[in-house]
Structures are given as structure tokens and as C-alpha cells.
Image (cartoon, rainbow, N blue to C red):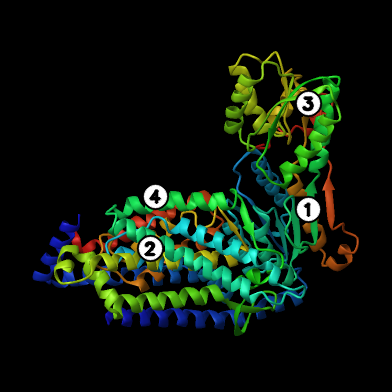
Amino acid sequence: MSDAAAGSVAGSVVTRSPLARSLDLLQQYGVLVAFVGLFAFNAIWQGDAFLKPENLRNLLNQNAAVGIVAVGMTLVIVAGGIDLSVGAVMALAAAVGMLAMNGLAGMVDAEGAGQFVPLLAGFASAIGVGLACGALNGGLVTLGRIPAFIATLAGLIGFRSITLALAEGGEIRADQAITAVQAIGRDGLAIPGVVNAYDKPVVFYWTILLFLVVVVLGQLTLSRTRLGRHLVAVGSNELAARYSGVPVARVKLWSYTIVGFCAALGGIASTVRMNSVSSSQLGLYAELDAIAAVVIGGTSMTGGRGRVWGTLLGVLILVMITNMLSLWQVEVYWQGFVKGVIIVLAVLIQRGRAS
Amino acid sequence: MTMLRSLAAAGALLSLSLLAACGSGGTEPAPSATASTVAAAPKIKIGVSVPAADHGWTAGVVWWAKEAMALNPDVEWLFQTAETPDKQIQDIENMMTQGVDGLVVLATESAPLTPIAKQAHENGILIVNVDRGFLEPVADIFLEGDNASFGRKSAEFIVDRLDGKGKVVILEGIPCTVNTARVDAAMEVFNANPGIEIVGRDTGMWNRQKSLDVMQNILVQAPEIDAVWASDDDMALGAEQAIVEAGRQDEMWILGGAGMKDIVKRVMDKDPMYPADITYPPSMIATGIQMAVSVLEDGNREEIMKFMPQHLLIDVELILPENAKRHYFPDSVF
């Protein structure tokens, strides 16, 4: 499959007809066109309901957690890998973080002061778990020479199982003393002059800010750093990269560690939104949503080519579809079908050049 | 470089659209404000959010919700079902964006739905919470079925019918407060009657297939069984299949629960397998919807809330052949 793609790329370089060039553009910016088109369609069709700042904010927030994970997933896929365990890592990191937080809840006094330390300890241990899981995946893929699909499939099953065991299959709620979890999930920067239908200020949630920061950092890593160039090199031709002195194993290890880190951040974002950690639900199918966003965003599944901003648009496209169907009161069972069609269409359009 | 440039372009586009949105958002309240000052009564808007119909009882909830909404065509209804708490939070967020006056919520899970319910409460939205409560007192009205009464009445029926002496199997639901309240109350009754012996106890997860599986195991282990306390009609049907497959249908009978129409029909027809059933009416969602309408419809919310009960416990009833007709709704999906 990667051979065929490489062949067609070489072919189009030789014969650069205007048609090939416009197909190139479509492949390059198809996701932008799709995003703008879907946005305009929603804006015209739904009018006020869609364009309300509150709604746009909700759209961003609803998939911030998956979006953060999708950024990490982009880097892994660019390097020619895949990580199926991200959803389970989100849950495990969040569960350990919540347990650590609750364990230190005794430090909080009756007025609710002193929540900072438990909160910090919770977030830090969640991130620690994410990094460790990511490094483990990376180690299995590089040192253990297990195909990424298999190694991270084992992670998907194994990490979820640990999470279920930790929570005895149920949900872990924040200790009643730690009110900050809930507060962080529903707080943020007030957007000046914008009020909701009830004359209350609309806030730009912290989780959205975190998501956007991760997107910018992810894009900068990919396009501006040596690690980014190495990821692309390893993804497009591992052998050539090795011969040109790229530390392939270390680059791969980094990519899995980064996605583990992103999964932990996503787990935290999900925890503060849900005010609890559901061992069976948190991050469920997040790997599929993340991969879908990456694919829609125009990153090649065979590696070597990708962009984080495309993934951002991919996330937003998925969110807009869900929102549209929800506002149209389409039964929830049909939403997956529509998403599936969109994913196939996205891939077909982006492969336009090859056909 | 091109990537950065396009990133910037995408960012610019996003912020432009956000700006445009802010513009339209800012001017939006004006027309609705004038609309409400014009004499024509503004339609009240109520959001109804319930779990997706994944088993019989929740299917009944959806059916009754639709019935109650159809009875109030003057209200603008926003109705959504959700199979996960995450989807339910999104639904409620969308309902708030559309400016609902009231929300009727049967929560998929308590903890995740509490913050959004709190936010709705802070926005001054009337919240009617049905059957599964929030962790904080943010609902204006909370109505739930009386699960302790469910456990007690069902166990008492079994004890009476066995004349205080017999071998009973217990099938439990999904481990949660609802199941615990039912089982604890039932066990209290059984334990108070030394003639009753519990010969099998397992969880059927309120699921027909799972109940079939566990009942098969219990049938192997227990050579003699007089009655099955199945606590749910889906579980009763699963257990019945196991019993019939084992050829032991003449040996025992089943008491389910929740008032599924097929079971109620068989009680009505005096089927020996089902001497009775016990209600846990999914129609309570309709009760909640009707209460929300009556509080909101004439703009007298504050006056009405002075005497509306804040917590309602809905009692359960034994369905016997004599009164089954009153509990039989052939058009219902449940």
C-alpha cells in the first residue's frame, strides 16, 4: 500500500498538469473546504442556534478531550505508527489521578481551602501514568519489536482492565471536599459582553484553552523542531531515515510517550467535565474518534505526511456533525453511520490525486 | 512554513466566525424580548433528557415521555435520548443554548450530570429530576419510585403465597442504589420468616440473556425451588426460559417487576408461572413532564413552587389478576 502511494507521488511530480495541481490543492486543503462548507451549511440551516457563541463554545468543549488525544495521535501516525490504547490510557491516568486526589482530600479544611496540593498531586500522577504507559507502548514497539497495532491493542485491553479493577467496575467520584474538580470543568475566561439566554456570562472553558495550546504546541513540534522532521523521516521511509543517521528507535519511543502524555491530559479534561471517572466509559472509543479526526485532517495513515491543524479541523468536523444531528433530533443510533460515511468520503477526496 | 500559514488562516477563519457569532449573539436577545412584551403569549420551552431505550423499562420511559409531550402541544419540546452521560451533558448544553425554561431529566448517571444540572439551576431553569437523583440539591422537584417498598411488597407476596415456607431464588439487578434498596428490603422480609430458604442468589443485571445464564446455573445447583424473586420483568423472562428448557416449569413460579405489558397480560390471563407482578411505572417520566408544564405554563412559577412538593416518592402496587386490567397498556412498547 505504501509502495503504491509512493509510486503515484513520484508520477505526479513528473507530469504536473493543471488538473493534477488542482487535485493536489484539493488534497491539501480539502479538509479546510469541508470545514468551511459544513460551518456555512450549519450557519445557514440552523441560523441563530448554531452561531450562538455559547453553542460554538460547547462544540469545542465537547470534544476537547478527544481533540487533545488526536494531536498526539497525529504525531504517532506521522511516524508510521498507531496507538490504539489511548482511550484506556485516558481512563487509567484519570482513575489514578482521582484516587491520588481523594487520598489527599484530608488536607482540605471545612471552608474548602487547601485544595491546591491534592489537585496538583492528582494531575501530576495522572500525567505520570500517561507518560509511563506511552513509554511502555514505545518500548514494546521498538525494543520488543511488536507491531504497533498489536502492542497497543494489548494496551487497550490491559490498561482498561487495570482501570476497571481500580474502580471495581464503577465510577470514582471526586471526594466531596474537593469541589475544585467540578469548578475547573465549568470555569474559564469570561468572554466580555457575551451572555447566554439567561443573561449569564458565557465563559471560555479552561479545557478548551488547554486543547488549543496542545494544538499549537503539536503543530510547532511537527513543523519547527528536529523531532518533528525526524518523525516525518521515520514515517516516510524508516530504512532511509536510519541510514541518514536518524535515531529511529528513540524517535518512535518519543512519539508514543507524547501520545501517552496527551492521553493523560485528555483524561484530566474528561474528568473535570464529568466530575468523576467512569472506569468503563471514560475514553471509550476515544482511539477511534482520534484516528478518525487524524484521517479526516489529511494525515496519511501510512506515515510521512501529516499536519496537526488538519486534525483540529477533523475534530471540529466530527463535532459539527454530531451537533447538527443532535439539533435535528436525529436518533442517536444513526449518528455513527453518518460519521462513518464522512470518514470514507474524507479519505476518498484526499486520495483524489492517486486515482 | 505553508503549514504554519494555513494554520494561521484557519485560526483567522475561526476567530472571524466567532466574531460574527458574537455579533449575532449580541443582537439576538432583542427580538425575543420584544416578542415577550407583545401580548401574544410566548411559547414555553421545555427540554426532556432521558437515557436511550436500551432495555424494556427505558423503552417505556421514552414511550411515556412522548405521550406526555403530545398531550401538551402548546409547549415547545426539545427531546433527546442519550446512551452515555457524555451525550446527555451535550444534549442538556444544547437545550440551554436554545433557552429552555424547564428541564425534565432522568439521569444516565448521577455524578457526571450534577455539574450541568447545577449550571442549569444557576441559570434559573426549572429542573424536574425523575428517578435518578443528582449529588447536590439542584433539582426543584425530585420524583422517584419507592424501591424499598418494591422490595418489601414483592417479598411479602412471596412469603404469603408460600404460607411462610419454601425455597426461593433471588435475581439481582445492576449493582447500584436502586438494586440495593430493593434487595435489602426484600431480604429483611425473607429473613424475618425462618421457613423461607434462599437456595440461589446471583445478578441478572436487569438483562434477559444474563438472567437466562445465571438461572441455568442455579437450576443445576438447586434441586428444589418454589419461587423466583426476579425483581424485573426482563429478568423474569430470562429466568422463565431457563426453567422451561430444564423442564421444571410445574415446580415453581416467578415474580418479576416493573409492569411489562406481556407479563401483565399473563397475570390477567392467570398464567400459573406469573401469579402477580409489581409496578415500577416508567410513566413517572410523564408525571414529571406534566408537573413541569403545570409549574411553567401560566407564568406563576414562583407561586406554584410554594406548594409543589420537592420530593415525591411514588409507591408501587401489586398487579394481581383482579386489577391487572388497570395496569395493562397494550399500545405501550413496554
Which residue in the structure is indicated by mark 3? B276
Q: Are marks 3 and 2 on the same chain?
A: no
Give the alpha-carbon distance from disc 1 to disc 3, as whole Å: 29 Å
Q: Are marks 1 and 3 on the same chain?
A: yes
Find residue A71 and report its horizontal and vertical position in percent. Answer: 39, 69
How many C-alpha atoms fall within 10 Å of the one at disc 2: few (<14), some, or many (≥20)? many
Q: Residue at x 71, y 72 (%)?
A: A108
Q: Are marks 3 and 4 on the same chain?
A: no
Q: Residue at x 70, y 16 (%)?
A: B224
In the rendered structure, the answer to whether residue B66 lies left or right of residue B305 reads left
Which residue in the structure is indicated by mark 2? A135
Which residue in the structure is indicated by mark 4? A154
Q: Secondary structure at mark 3?
A: loop
- Is the C-beta separation of discs 2 and 1 under 8 Å? no
Please tell me whether mark 1 or mark 4 is closer to you in this view.
Answer: 4
Looking at the rendered image, the quarter that the N terminus of chain A falls into is: bottom left
Q: Quadrant of residue B211?
A: top right
Give the alpha-carbon distance from disc 2 to disc 4, as whole Å: 14 Å
Give the alpha-carbon distance from disc 3 to disc 4, as whole Å: 49 Å
Indicate the chain on which mark 3 is placed. B
Q: Amino acid at mark 1?
A: Gln
- Is the C-beta separation of discs 1 and 3 under 8 Å? no
Q: Residue at x 24, y 61 (%)?
A: A351
- Is the C-beta separation of discs 2 and 4 under 8 Å? no
